[in-house]
Image (spheres, coloured by chain):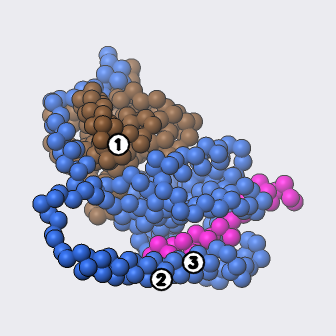
Chain colours: A brown, B blue
Amino acid sequence: MDVMVSARRDLEGLYREHGKRLWWALVAFSGDREIASDAGSEAFAQALRRGDGIRDPLAWIWRAAFRIAAGELQERAMQAPPLTEPMYELPEPAAEVTAALRQLPAQQRAAVVLHYYADRPIREIAEVLGTSTSTVAVHLHRGRNRLRDLLGDDDV
Amino acid sequence: MSDLREQLRRIETSAPPDLWREIEMRATKNRPEIEPSVIVFRPRGAQVRRRVAAGLLAAAVFALTAVVVWEASRSAVVPRPKPPQGTIPTGWEKCTNASHGYSIAYPGDWYTTDVFDGASDPANACQWFSLDPFGPRGNVVSEGWGYPFEVAIRGPFDQVREQELDPEIADVIVEENLLVKGHRAVRVEYETLIDLIGETDMHYEYLIELDAERTLIVHTTTTRGVTGVYADNKVVVDRAVDTLQFLADSSSAS
């Protein structure tokens, strides 16, 4: 029981420290606040259910949250044609960035968000995407070039 | 001018919602603990009889399922009368991906495309197979698993195997080492442990070592939205693997 309480306290600490960044990363990836909240909550909830059975809870939660969000996006894509506009209105700077990100393929977008926004290590991104570190490097290279065109910033 | 990191940080336009209460609610919702207030008292004898009956019913269902699964897997994988290696079943079509150096056959009434999100690329050939026609934008679902029969190229074999069968992600049901056309391979079936609100997915696939750097995965899944019957799709995957040809092997043999 003490172990459960301790695991819960540790996870709440992780949520307080990293939850905000995870949520924004999921918004950036999915373009949708609802998916971000759903995927983030479910990832933490599943970690909570597993107690102390996870070696690296933070990496596990990032991976779970992105896979859940990707599943939600995939399900929506199969139910309806892909949307060209974000599903929910975001304030201007966020809307511009998410609109640019939405033009990248899903794996490229996830790699860019996880690396450049969330500062997750490449090895961990490879695990999230179920691919190799060299493929992640290719995604990052292509994604960065594409965003440079879309956001019109020479320094990107 | 800002760099990409700063550009992306512009997305933080307001405070995110505090989800901790929602997280705790979700975590307890599926936990198999019963509140004392919802336990219904029953006479002990009736309770025992009910449990025995439930146990017998569960055992019968399990036995029946095991027989069906065993029959399906036996007919799909083990001593099926095998055509000569590389022979394409009647009614199937051969598909060649010269970029990655393989050919594989698929049912002739299925569809395939090399178009991803509107852009055609020969390197995408023979990767996505579907019972339904692809639209003009081709594969719009994902670069991962979204179709009833898919082929993917990944990194080194041991690394891919470790990633696919990570015990924190996958509950492995079948793991069988074998050789496919002389290439190291493993046939696996697993259930994902990471799920959305109680829904898990089954995955059935062959990981085949293409060379030191690349692994070819032939795959099907029950992931939501994927068409067809999972057991039938597994048979398609088995038969397709029988038809695999590796172009480098053919050229070195000739």
Which is more N-terminal, label 3 or label 2? 2
What percent of the width, then of the height, locates residue A69?
32, 48
Per the image, label 1 sits on a secondary structure element best described as: loop
Label 3 Cα crowd, 10 Å radius (few <14 / some 14-19 / many 20+): few
Q: Is residue B36 visible?
A: yes
Q: Quadrant of residue A117?
A: top left
Q: In what quadrant of the picture does the N terminus of chain A appear?
A: top left
Q: Which residue is mark 3?
A: B70
What percent of the width, then of the height, locates residue B76?
61, 76
Q: Chain of mark 2?
A: B
Q: Which residue is mark 1?
A: A51
Q: Is residue A127 magenta?
A: no
Left or right: where A43 falls relative to A94: right
> Is A104 drawn above or below residue B147 in the view shown?
above
Q: Amino acid at mark 2?
A: Leu
What percent of the width, then of the height, locates residue B28?
23, 51
Specify the principal SS of the magenta part. Answer: helix
Residue at 31% of width from left, 59% of height from top? B198
